[in-house]
Structure formats: C-alpha cells, structure tokens
Image (cartoon, grey):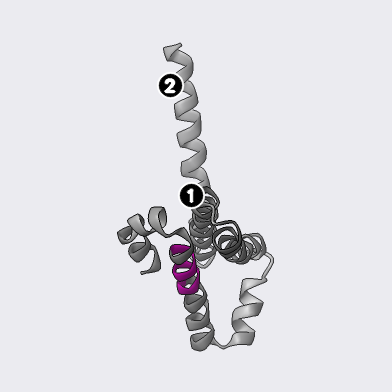
Amino acid sequence: TCLGLAIFFVPIIVFAPAKFAFFFTCGNIFLLCGTMFLVGPTRQLKSMFDKSRLTATILYTTSLVFTLIAAIKFGSLMMVMFFTCVQIVSFIWYVLSYIPFARTVIKTIYNRTCSFLGLFFRRSS
C-alpha cells in the first residue's frame, strides 16, 4: 500500500522531498508497528533480528533514518530518492525472507539474467 501510494504521489518527491520522505517513512514505520500489533513486539523483534533477516533489517531500519535525515537536514532530492529506493529494496528482501525459497528463486533469476545479458553483449561487440 505504501509503495503504491508513493508511486501515485511521485510529483511530491520533486516539489516537496521532505514531505514525501516524512510520509513515506512514517507509512513504513506504521507498517512495522502493525505487524508488531499482530504478532507481538517481542516475537516481531526476534523475527526481525533472526540471522536470516539481519542484513535486510539493518538496511531497512537505517534507510528509514537516513531518508528522514536526507530530507529534513539536507533537503537533498537525490539523497531522498536514493534512500527511498534502499528502503523499498530492503523491505522487499525482508518480506521475501518469510516466503520459503523466495530469495533463492530471486537470486537464481538474477544470476541467469546477468549471465544471459553478459553473453548477449559479448556477442554483439
């Protein structure tokens, strides 16, 4: 939902990056709070900091903070866009950790695509 709303309000990124970053990041924080409400804060935090999710959790939480810093302190559109992208990618990677073999499938698709593109570009030059 947050991602869909963010895409819908793309013009806000350009004209008011601080507002966009604030609302997008707050939406993601509310999302985490919602799952804490469903499963309980202790279980959620244990799950978030599980070995298989640790990297995604750290990336996700630090990108939340850095998105706000980039918007409020620096007012930098490029930094806001970068950290928002990091938020989205790390959140997707975090969610995929709950689906059995999802990360493995994504890694396989990525590796095969890269190897295919590598062969394609080597032949054309």
> In the image, is residue 63 part of the stretch drawn in magenta?
no
Q: Estimate the x, y position of residue 21 in percent, counting from the top left.
A: 48, 63
Residue 98 spot, x, y in % from top left:
52, 68
Q: Position of residue 68 (x, y in %)?
A: 56, 65
Q: Could you say which disc has been placed on residue 120 in the image? A: 2
- Comparing 28 with 111, the one in front is 28
The crowd level at tag 2 (other Cα within 10 Å; few <14, some 14-19, many 20+) is: few
Magenta stretch prevailing secondary structure: helix
Q: Which residues are magenta?
A: 20-27
Q: Is residue 7 left or right of residue 92?
A: left
* Residue nearest the viewer, comparing 124 with 62: 62
Q: Considering the numbered disc 2 on the image, is that residue within a helix, a strand or a loop?
A: helix
Front-most of 77 and 65?
Answer: 77
| Farthest-out residue, left | 8
Q: Position of residue 90 (x, y in %)?
A: 55, 58
**Where is the N terminus found, in terms of image quarters?**
bottom left
Query: According to the image, label 1 marks what residue?
Result: 106
Q: Residue at x 62, y 60 (%)?
A: 59
Determine whether 29 is above or below 55 in the image: below
Q: Earlier in the sequence, mark 2 or mark 1?
A: 1
**Residue with the most extreme top position:** 125
